[in-house]
Image (cartoon, rainbow, N blue to C red):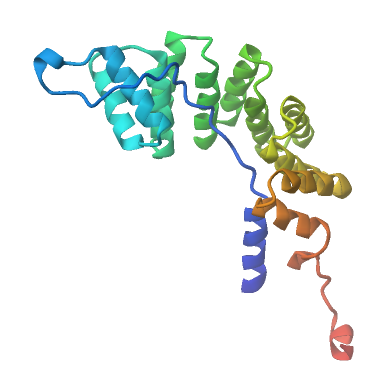
Amino acid sequence: MEASDKRKQEIKKVNKIKTFSAPLATGEIEKSSSFSNNEENKPSKEQILNQAFKFHSQGNIQEAAKYYQLLINQGFEDQRVFCNFGVILKNLGKLQEAEFYNRKAIKLNPDFVEAHSNLGSILKDLGNLKEAERSYRKAIELNPNFAMAYLNLGNIFKDLGNLKESERSYRKAIELNPDFVEAHSNLGSILKDLGNLKEAERSYRKAIELNPNFVKAKMNLDFITKKQVPLWHIPMMNDDQRNNA
C-alpha cells in the first residue's frame, strides 16, 4: 500500500504543468558604476533605476530589490519598478505584496502587458483561478501574440477542469511559438488526460526533440508508451490466480 501511494505521488509530480512569469520589464539598461554616498555625487532616480535593471538582468536579485525599494521609498512611480519588484516578491513567496505592486503597475499603465500576465501568475498561486484567467485574457487582448500568456491560460483551464479549453490554449501557444518546449509537454499531459494517447506521445516526443534533456517529458513518454506501468493499472489478482501464479 505504501509503495502504491509513493508511486502515485511520483506520477503526479511527473504530470505537473509548468507555469511561467512574464519577462522583466527592463527598458534600456545603461552602464553605471557604484553610487557614492557623497551628497554632491548623489545619483538621479534614472541612474538608480538603470542600476536596478542592471542588477536584475544579471541575476543579482538581492541588490536589485534594494534599488527597487529605494525608488519606491523615494516616491518614484514607474510601472516597471512596481512590476519587477512584484516579480521578486512572488519568487520569495510574498504573494500578497507581489499582488499589491503588480496592481500598482497596472494602475499606472493599464496597457502594461507583462504586469497583467504576472498578476495572473500571482493570483493563480493564491488560488484565485477565475481572476487569474481574467488577467491572462487581458494580457492576450493587449498582445494577441503573447505565447506565454496562452500557456499560462491553458494551465488555468486545466486546474478548472476545462481540458478542451486548456488544449486550445496550448495549441495556440505552439502556433505562436512552434519551439515552445513546455507548451508541447503540457499539451501532451492534457491529451493524455483526454485519452488521446497517440497524439500525447507525439507531443512528448516533440518536446524531447526540442530539448533532449527534458526529463519530465521523457518520463511521461515512458508512461504513454507503456515502458512504465502505473501501479493502479496493474490488475488485481484473485485468490485462484494468486495460488496458480
Looking at the image, how many numbered discs can be counted on the residues? 0
Q: In this view of the protein, which residue sits in the foreground, 143 or 241? A: 143
Q: Is residue 138 left or right of residue 26?
A: right
Nearer the observer, 182 or 7:
182
Query: Is the C terminus in the top left, top right, bottom left or bottom right quadrant?
Result: bottom right
How far from the left and from the top, in percent, is residue 132? 57, 27
Residue 33 sits in which quadrant? top left
Percent of width and height locating residue 138: 61, 16
Q: Quadrant of residue 71?
A: top left
- Residue 227 image point, x, y percent: 80, 65
Q: Say left or right for 64 vs 102.
A: left
Residue 142 seen in the current view? yes
Residue drawn where x is 34% and y is 19% of the image: 50
Image quadrant where one finds the N terminus: bottom right
Vertical side of 91 occupied by 168: above or below: above
**Would you place residue 245 above or below residue 61 in this image?**
below
Q: Is residue 146 above or below residue 184?
A: above
- Residue 1, can we see it? no
Residue 178, position as x, y percentages in the image = 75, 31
Task: Tell me if 116 is positioned left or right of 214 in this view.
Answer: left
For the residue pair 98 and 207, the one nearer the viewer reads as 207
**242 or 158, nearer to the observer:** 158
- The correct choice, above or below, for 204 with respect to 152 in the image is below
* Residue drawn at (11%, 13%) of the image: 40
- The residue at the far bottom in this view is 243
User: Does residue 206 appear left or right of residue 36 in this picture?
Assistant: right
